[in-house]
Amino acid sequence: TQQLLSEPSQEARRAPARPCRVSSADRKVRKGLMARSLEDLLRKVRDVFKLKGKSFTLVLEEDGTIVETEEYFQALAGDTVFMILQKGQKWQPQAEQQGTRYQL
Amino acid sequence: TQQLLSEPSQEARRAPARPCRVSSADRKVRKGLMARSLEDLLRKVRDVFKLKGKSFTLVLEEDGTIVETEEYFQALAGDTVFMILQKGQKWQPQAEQQGTRYQL
């Protein structure tokens, strides 16, 4: 039924919630969230970053690796920083030398 | 039987799944995958990067070393970045200075 489909999976419900940091693509906003699963994180990111109805991907802030499987999410360290990429946004390395002159 | 042939090997099933990062040859797409073995990784890369029926090789992103034995795969560190080279594609070093001007 429809209700069953919208419930989190058994596995996702069993996993403990863990802290995740989530950054906007321009690295100007970074928020801390608790998530039990990738599914849970995606749902919370959608709420917190006001992305309802918008399509976006979560990547690793460090190198732009796309995180799209539950398995891979579970294998990541607790202090992982994620980045939200909306349609048309591209991951860019952090411009450490340039500081605030960094542009997306 | 056909079913037996498509099952992962005994050895591959016993090894724990580990996180792998896999990059396209132009370094524009990088995805995180879990794999128990080189065989498993190749199968997942084929699915995830839509390479069915195409021939490709996995190399180390860092220096283009071809990874073709199970043993060597198992000896690699968990954070290894692999690169997919399809027929005609060549490994190129990352152009760090040029940033987005990097061309394949």
Image: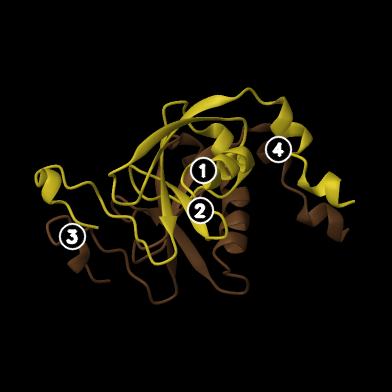
Chain colours: A yellow, B brown
Of the image marks 4 and 3, the number of the one nearer the N terminus: 4
Which secondary structure, mark 2? loop
The image shows residue B52 at horizontal and vertical percentages of 62, 71
Which secondary structure, mark 1? helix
Chain for numbered disc 3: B
Q: Which residue is mark 2?
A: A51
Q: CA distance from mark 4 to mark 2?
A: 39 Å
**Which residue sits at x=66%, y=40%?**
B12
Tell me, yes or no, whether the two marked residues, 2 and 1, touch with CB atoms within 8 Å.
yes
Tell me, yes or no, whether the two marked residues, 2 and 3, touch with CB atoms within 8 Å.
no
**Which residue sits at x=71%, y=38%?**
B13
Q: Are marks 4 and 1 on the same chain?
A: no
Location of residue A61 by image quarter = top left
Q: Which residue is mark 1?
A: A45
Chain for numbered disc 4: B
The image shows residue A76 at horizontal and vertical percentages of 49, 33
Give the numbered dot on residue B31. Answer: none
Q: Which residue is mark 3?
A: B99
* Residue type, label 4: Arg
Indicate which label's residue lies in the foreground, 4 or 1: 1
* Residue type, label 1: Val
**Which residue sits at x=62%, y=74%?**
B53
| Label 1 Cα crowd, 10 Å radius (few <14 / some 14-19 / many 20+) | many
Q: CA distance from mark 2 to mark 3?
A: 29 Å
Q: CA distance from mark 1 to mark 3?
A: 29 Å
Q: Which residue is mark 4?
A: B13
The image shows residue A47 at horizontal and vertical percentages of 54, 44
Q: CA distance from mark 4 to mark 3?
A: 40 Å
Residue at the bottom extreme of this rendering? B88
